[in-house]
C-alpha cells in the first residue's frame, strides 16, 4: 500500500472520488459515461464509487460503498453503475491497487480497435512499460450475456486476469481501464494513457517513431513519481478555476 493511501481517511477518499470525477470530465477522459473508484481505506474489502450518474454531476452525497462482489452496501434508492464489477474484480485480484478508472476516450477506442500495439512514446508513459493488453473476451452467447458491457462477476474476473499486473488495458469496441495505488495516481495515468496514444498514432503516421525502451522506462519511473502531486494539484486547479463551487468539495 502506498504511503499516500495509508494516511487517507474515508472522508478524504470520498472527497477525492468527487474531485476525480470532475477532473476526468474536465480533461476529456469522461463524458456522460465513465466511473472512478477508490478502495475503502477503513475496509479494504469494499470500495467507494458514485451512483450511476454523469461524472461531472457527482457530489459527496452520491458516493456509495460497494463490496468486492458488486453488492451495494450503502442503503440508498439510487442505482450504482452496472459495470462496478470491473472495479470489484480488480480490487479482489490486485491488493496493490487502490483506485480504478473505467472510461471511453476516443483515442483509447481507436487503438483498441486498430490492432496497433500500445507503445510508450512520451516519457510520462514509462509507467506502462509492461504493456497495455487488449480485452476481447465479451459474453454474447450465455443466458447472462451483456455484450460489450462487463456486468457479471465472471466477466469482471476475466478482465482482471487479462489486466494482470499491468497499469492499464484497452477494451475492444469499448474503452479502457486504468489502475493506480491512489486516486491521484490512477487519474494521472488515465490522462497519460490517452495522451500517449494520440502522440504514438500521430508519430507512426508522420514517420518512424522512437519508442521508450524498457530500460529507459525503469529509469524514468522513480524520477516521475515526484510529479504526481504536482499533476493532481494542477488538475484540481483547472476544475476549480472553471467551477468556483468546487471549492466546497473539500481539500484536494
Image (spheres, rainbow, N blue to C red):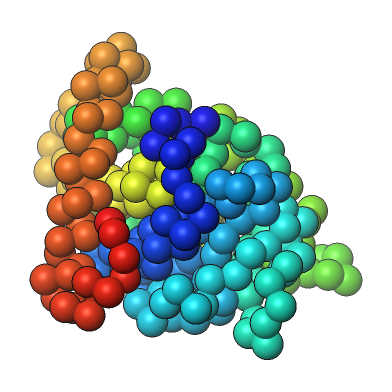
Image quarter of residue 196: top left
Foreground residue, 13 or 162?
Answer: 13
Q: Which residue occupies 47% across, 59% down? A: 11
Q: From the top left corner, tell me how far across and down residue 184 is, in percent.
A: 34, 47
Q: Which residue occupies 38% across, 26% down? A: 129
Query: Is 124 drawn above or below residue 22 in the view shown?
Result: above
Q: Which residue occupies 57% across, 60% down? A: 48
Q: From the top left corner, tell me how far across and down residue 143 is, in percent.
A: 88, 71
Foreground residue, 22 or 14?
Answer: 14
The reply to whether residue 28 is in sight is no
Residue occupying the far bottom of the picture: 77
Query: Is 93 drawn above or below residue 215 in the view shown?
Result: below
Foreground residue, 199 or 193?
Answer: 193
Image quarter of residue 150: bottom right
Residue 175 lies left or right of residue 151; in this view the side is: left
Residue 133 lies left or right of residue 220; in this view the side is: right
Residue 181 lies left or right of residue 93; in this view the side is: left
Q: From the top left corner, tell me how far across and down residue 85 is, in percent.
A: 68, 59
Amino acid at each position: 500500500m502506498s504511503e499516500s493511501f495509508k494516511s487517507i481517511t474515508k472522508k478524504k477518499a470520498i472527497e477525492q472520488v468527487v474531485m476525480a470525477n470532475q477532473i476526468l470530465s474536465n480533461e476529456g477522459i469522461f463524458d456522460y459515461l465513465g466511473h472512478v473508484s477508490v478502495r475503502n481505506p477503513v475496509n479494504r474489502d469494499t470500495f467507494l464509487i458514485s451512483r450511476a450518474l454523469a461524472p461531472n454531476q457527482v457530489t459527496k452525497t452520491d458516493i456509495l460503498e460497494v463490496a468486492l462482489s458488486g453488492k451495494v452496501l450503502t442503503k440508498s434508492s439510487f442505482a450504482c453503475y452496472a459495470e462496478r464489477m470491473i472495479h470489484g474484480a480488480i480490487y479482489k485480484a490486485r491488493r496493490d491497487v487502490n483506485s480504478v478508472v473505467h472510461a471511453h476516450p476516443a483515442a483509447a477506442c481507436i487503438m483498441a480497435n486498430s490492432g496497433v500495439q500500445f507503445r510508450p512514446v512520451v516519457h510520462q508513459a514509462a509507467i506502462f512499460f509492461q504493456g497495455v493488453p487488449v480485452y476481447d473476451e465479451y459474453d454474447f452467447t450465455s443466458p447472462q450475456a451483456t455484450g460489450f458491457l462487463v456486468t457479471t462477476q465472471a466477466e469482471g474476473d476475466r478482465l482482471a486476469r487479462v489486466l494482470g499486473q499491468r497499469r492499464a488495458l484497452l477494451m475492444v469496441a469499448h474503452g479502457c481501464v486504468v489502475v493506480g495505488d491512489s486516486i491521484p495516481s490512477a487519474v494521472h495515468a488515465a490522462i497519460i494513457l490517452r495522451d500517449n496514444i494520440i502522440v504514438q498514432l500521430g508519430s507512426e503516421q508522420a514517420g518512424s517513431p522512437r519508442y521508450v525502451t524498457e530500460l529507459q522506462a525503469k529509469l524514468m519511473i522513480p524520477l516521475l513519481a515526484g510529479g504526481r502531486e504536482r499533476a493532481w494539484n494542477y488538475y484540481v486547479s483547472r476544475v476549480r478555476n472553471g467551477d468556483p463551487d468546487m471549492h466546497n468539495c473539500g481539500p484536494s
